Amino acid sequence: MRTAVLGVSGSVAAYRACDLARSLMREEFVVRVCLTDGAQKFVSVALFEALTGQPCLQDTFEEPERGRMAHIDWARSASVLVIAPATANVINKIANGYADDMLTTLALAYTGPMVVAPAMNPSMFAHEATRASLETLRARAAVIVEPDEGEVACGEQGQGKLASVEQIVNAVTSVANVAQLLKGKTVLVTSGPTEEQLDDVRVLTNRSSGKMGAAVARAALLMGAEVTVVAGPQRAPLPLQSQNISVRTAQQMLDAAKPFAKTADLIVGVAAVADYRPADKVEGKIRSGEMGEVKLVPNPDVLAELSKLTKGRSIAFAAEPDGGIEKAREKIEKKGVYAVAVNDIGRSDIAFDSEYNDLTLLFADGREASSGRMSKLKCALWLLTQVCEERA
């Protein structure tokens, strides 16, 4: 049975959360409700406990089960977190990591899919702070159910009315269904750059922040997979819920990933692996003016080797300076992969160091699909959904 945690904040539209709770129950969700102090000015704990048959939280230190921290228990057991209605106050708090009541504390502890349905005065919805917070939540793969246009409670006209219950329920069920697409599957992700020692100070490497690899790992977790990440020395933090293995060189990456490749249902090779390494590492430090000719030897093709081991599917990433579709397509056969995701590193609005990407997915049978420009996390969700649909 799926569990939806419904966060209700202090909007006049809070009364509509009652219908939302019942509608989610008809969709076979167990519904647990958490109220802010503001919400309790309009609706009550007793009302939602009667409607749902579940405890309703409000105070930060409440413990329906003595000795167990409710905000952690509820966050870990939830299939989806729904905040409806979501006031400007709650949206801005959650986007910026505040945790000063039960709902925001629970949201900060929660790592799964989230649906946010704003409801507020049109001027508050249009304010740049609110718009920025909504963009932040979108970048984290939250689904925003846009408010309707019309007359709001204060009598003003504009966009700010809580969306219909039907719209919110549709968003919740869609998100929850995506969260099941990789349930029971194992996903192996290679991420970040690799480094090859020239001397004890210098390395040969590729430019990679690891943001796309971290996004793929998080997307796979959101979709229900068991995830292992083998990562070079990247700057982007990896999800705590995945099994994360740190390596430095291409050979170390291959050696660390091999045992997991054999049982993986899907391998996603996002790592920017150095193609060559120095034939001989110099001990100590090469002094200025002492650098002579450096002989390079090829590194193993990590993804090609892993693809030979797996009984599942492998996806490669190709960073091309001009979109390079034909060059990228050659990698499908060369690496023995099911598909290649191409990102254009010639663009300044995506790819390296950016929070955004724009992927073109090339399949082995010649088909193509494009994501459009989205946050890297949304690109990763799009990519994995494409693969799941193909598998089906």
Image (cartoon, grey):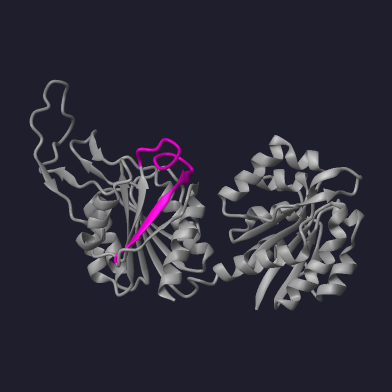
Q: Residue at x 36, y 44 (%)?
A: 344
Drawn side of residue 123 relative to residue 381, left or right: right
The image quarter containing residue 306 is bottom left
Nearest the camera: 349 or 1? 349
Residue 149 location (% of width, % of height): 78, 50
Drawn side of residue 181 relative to residue 162, left or right: left
Q: Residue at x 75, y 78 (%)?
A: 26
Question: Is residue 348 covered in magenta?
Answer: yes
Residue 186 location (% of width, % of height): 41, 70
Residue 48 visible: yes
The quarter in which the C terminus is drawn is bottom left
Question: Is residue 280 covered in magenta?
Answer: no
Residue 162 location (% of width, % of height): 79, 55
Vertical side of 175 occupied by 117: above or below? above
Q: Residue furthest top?
A: 289
Drawn side of residue 268 relative to residue 120, left or right: left
Q: Residue at x 65, y 39 (%)?
A: 132
Instruction: Report the magenta residues as a range.
Output: 345-364
Residue 73 visible: no
Vertical side of 336 occupied by 37: above or below? above
The quarter in which the N terminus is drawn is bottom right
Residue 125 location (% of width, % of height): 75, 42
Q: From the image, give the main secondary structure of the stretch colored magenta.
A: loop
Total tally of numbered discs in the picture: 0
Drawn side of residue 177 relative to residue 33, left or right: left
Q: Residue at x 70, y 61 (%)?
A: 82
